[in-house]
């Protein structure tokens, strides 16, 4: 009998290791032989630890889910014959029939929670390496064209077309080229990269290998944030297994291509998620942003042409190669093709990972999936796209998730992180926090960010404290808007230029939190 208990960091934090131990102990005590598999998480965190049992009874075939399971539930579950799908108050029925999962369009996360993350045979049995096999039957130019035709755009936040990056590196003449995966997932409320690395690591390896073949690179690095020890451990084990099986190394599965891959542990700095600061860090230097040009595709790691993509961008590639560009392009909306793994967090009842094609709305995510706020109070503000994303007020909750539609209202989708706040949130405090975060994380290279963020904290404090009737109030608001404008247009990288997003949106849509009767955009 096969039982699945996630070994995902979120599930472990909620007691999955202890539950797994209790299941093993109970089975041994009762003389029942079980095969306990530590899978990835399905991404429904309010149900973790989610225990699944593979069943084949007269009425059901598939996995029956139970959750959230605590250690004290385990012996009762055995008594209830859960190994045969027995009824229990924690029973959720067939996992695949849980509405939260059923309503999704899982492309990158199709195998998540289904397979044993480090089992190569399990990966292969679930279409693993099918994209790589097709890639090996094509010329590198055709592979780049397939990615271009799919319309895939970088999922790290900038949404730059992945195929154009690859084309630039493929065309560059250089003795050495690199593939770098940015897994420094530092945005608040985001975890899709971590889940991918912990729950389906070969998918990332396959995507990076395809990128290497397409562009002529022979060495790759995965730069993983130090706060992700489990992801580092799983990726290192997966790289060793893939190398042994010939999917990495000197002659990739009998071809003449070679690609070597290593994990680099990040230094714990938010700005090292900026691509050029990350390159500096991999080179062993302090993580300071480089001026562009030259772009990394021309002169990147150690001065060589380098493809830099986020985990989800690379993870999208195997499916594109396996099923073709049209399959991917037909999902989504306009120039936002394919799917986005959305991470729903904050004050929300059902937080978790939701993979949907572009076009889904925030209202659907907040209520159809999220079930409203966890506190039961009205939702007031939603920050979309990480700490540098705007606060999106209710008037925009019906906008489709689409890079252009969000940009048109001054918002961003970023890496797909959503943090929800109810009506007790004070947006002036959140705006102050945005400036403070920038001041702490600034690499210090340029003045608008280094100095501006600290001045921003001070101006917001003065604005909030100023008497509503005094002339100081409008003067401070104007000063804050001027400062934000300078940071937006004068900063070298996104940390400085995007920190004004949460500040200005808070000011525009929630002026009362700053003691203003109305916003006064200049
Ligand atoms: Fe560094 Fe901030 Fe300038 Fe970016 S904007 S280069 S983080 S000082």
Image: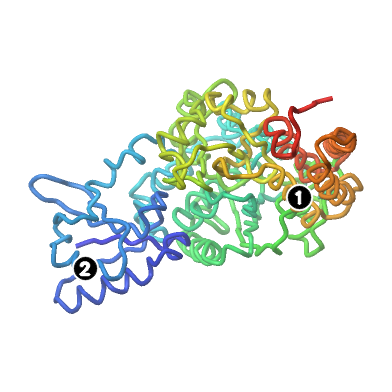
Determine which residue is flagged by label 2: 34
Above or below for 363 versus 307: above
Residue sitting at the far top: 334
The crowd level at tag 2 (other Cα within 10 Å; few <14, some 14-19, many 20+) is some
Determine which residue is flagged by label 1: 175
Q: In the figure, residue 142 lies in which quadrant?
A: top right
x then y, percent, for residue 189: 57, 49
Residue sitting at the far right: 447
Along the viewing direction, whichever of 511 and 267 lies nearer the viewer: 511
> Within 8 Å: ligand 1 and the Cβ of disc 2?
no
x then y, percent, for residue 385: 62, 40
- Disc 1 to disc 2, how far (Cα)? 52 Å
Q: Which callout, 1 or 2, points at the residue further toward the start of the chain? A: 2
Above or below for 330 versus 269: above
Above or below for 319 versus 222: above
Do we see residue 133 in this rendering?
A: no
């Amino acid at each position: 009998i096969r039982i699945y208990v996630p070994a995902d960091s979120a599930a472990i934090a909620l007691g999955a290791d202890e539950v797994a131990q209790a299941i093993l102990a109970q089975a041994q005590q009762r003389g029942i032989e079980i095969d306990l598999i530590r899978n990835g998480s399905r991404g429904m965190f309010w149900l973790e630890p989610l225990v699944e049992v593979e069943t084949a009874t007269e009425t059901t075939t598939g996995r029956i889910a139970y959750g959230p399971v605590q250690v004290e539930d385990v012996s009762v579950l055995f008594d209830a014959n859960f190994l045969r799908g027995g009824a229990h108050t924690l029973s959720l029925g067939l996992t695949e029939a849980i509405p939260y999962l059923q309503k999704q369009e899982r492309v990158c996360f199709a195998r998540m929670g289904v397979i044993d993350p480090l089992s190569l045979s399990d990966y292969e049995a679930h279409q693993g390496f099918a994209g790589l096999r097709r890639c090996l039957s094509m010329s590198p130019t055709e592979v780049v064209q397939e990615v271009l035709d799919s319309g895939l755009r970088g999922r790290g936040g900038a949404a730059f077309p992945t195929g154009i990056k690859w084309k630039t590196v493929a065309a560059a003449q250089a003795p050495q080229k690199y593939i770098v995966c940015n897994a420094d997932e530092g945005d608040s409320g985001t975890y899709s990269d971590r889940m991918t690395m912990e729950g389906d690591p070969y998918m990332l390896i396959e995507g990076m290998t395809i990128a290497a073949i397409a562009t002529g690179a022979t060495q790759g690095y995965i730069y993983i944030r130090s706060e992700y020890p489990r992801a580092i451990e799983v990726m290192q084990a997966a790289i060793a297994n893939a190398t042994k099986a010939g999917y990495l190394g000197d002659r990739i599965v009998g071809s003449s291509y070679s690609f070597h891959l290593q994990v680099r542990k990040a230094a714990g700095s938010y700005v090292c998620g900026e691509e050029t600061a990350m390159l500096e860090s991999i080179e062993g230097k302090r993580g300071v942003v480089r001026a562009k040009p030259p772009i990394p595709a021309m002169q990147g790691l150690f001065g060589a042409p380098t493809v830099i993509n986020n985990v989800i961008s690379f993870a999208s590639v195997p499916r594109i190669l396996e099923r073709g560009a049209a399959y991917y392009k037909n999902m989504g909306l306009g120039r936002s093709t394919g799917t986005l793994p959305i991470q729903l967090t904050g004050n929300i009842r059902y937080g978790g990972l939701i993979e949907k094609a572009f076009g889904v709305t925030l209202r659907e995510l907040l209520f159809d999936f999220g079930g409203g706020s966890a506190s039961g109070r009205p939702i007031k503000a939603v920050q979309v796209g990480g700490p540098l994303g705007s606060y999106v007020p209710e008037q925009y909750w019906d906008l489709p998730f689409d890079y252009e539609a969000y940009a048109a209202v001054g918002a961003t989708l970023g890496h797909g992180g959503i943090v929800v706040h109810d009506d007790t949130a004070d947006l002036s405090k959140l705006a102050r926090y945005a400036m403070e975060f920038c001041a702490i994380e600034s690499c210090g290279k340029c003045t608008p960010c280094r100095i501006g963020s600290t001045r921003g904290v001070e101006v917001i404090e003065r604005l909030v404290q100023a008497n509503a009737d005094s002339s100081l109030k409008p003067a401070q608001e104007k000063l804050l808007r001027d400062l934000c404008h300078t940071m937006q247009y004068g900063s070298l990288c996104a940390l400085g230029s995007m920190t004004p997003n949460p500040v200005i949106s808070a000011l525009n849509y929630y002026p009362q939190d700053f003691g203003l009767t109305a916003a006064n955009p200049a």
